Image (cartoon, grey):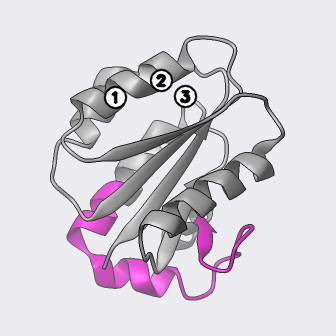
Amino acid sequence: MKIGILIVFRNAERKVEVQQFIDLFAEKTKLNVCFVNNGSTDKTFELLKEIQEEASIQISIIDVKKDRGHHAAIKAGVRYLTSVNELPYILCLPKYTANDFKILEKVFHTIQQEKDILKSLLKKPKRMVHKNVFSLRGILEKAS
């Protein structure tokens, strides 16, 4: 089962640790990862490109030139992911913060090890924007 991971960044230059992401995405996986740079005015986009080049998995980047809000950024990412892949689920992190890496790490390892648990977690959480788009934070709260 392929799963999309959508992460929205906005002026996150100081929050993004490139090596952490490279290490996280070192394993081969069936995840389809998409970063959305939501009108950042700092070097966030350059850091995302560096992660994309160094990671072992394919990562797509959508560069939204002007910030039109998180919902617009999420919709852009969802449209892209659904246009290139048939994904039953997309897990979304609508605004990346420094603390979110731990969430990503935990969800990523859950997906890698126990896909059946993930399927049960996705049965009743609150959906975002699109019928098969779920919040990573919501999934993690339900798992706890």
Answer with left or right where residue 28 lies relative to residue 100.
left
Task: Relative to 66, say whether 68 is above or below.
Answer: below
Q: Which amino acid does label 2 sit on?
A: Val
Mark 1 lies on a secondary structure that is helix
Can residue 52 be seen by looking at this rendering?
A: yes
Residues at marks 1 and 2, CA–CA distance in whole angstroms: 10 Å
Earlier in the chain: of badge 1 and badge 2, it is: 2
Residues at marks 3 and 1, CA–CA distance in whole angstroms: 16 Å
Mark 3 sits on what residue? Answer: 98
The residue at 72%/68% (across/down) is 128
- Whole-percent x, y for residue 9 in the image: 61, 33
Quadrant, the N terminus:
bottom left
The residue at 71%/27% (across/down) is 39
Label 1–label 2 contact, CB within 8 A: yes
Please check the rendered image and state whether residue 121 is part of the magenta-colored stretch, yes or no.
yes
Mark 2 sits on what residue? Answer: 16
Answer with left or right where residue 51 lies relative to residue 100.
left
The residue at 44%/19% (across/down) is 47
Q: Which amino acid does label 3 sit on?
A: Ala
State the image quarter where residue 119 is shown: bottom left
Q: What residue type is labelled 1?
A: Ile
Mark 1 sits on what residue? Answer: 51
Answer with left or right where residue 28 lies relative to residue 3.
left
- Whole-percent x, y for residue 84 in the image: 44, 64
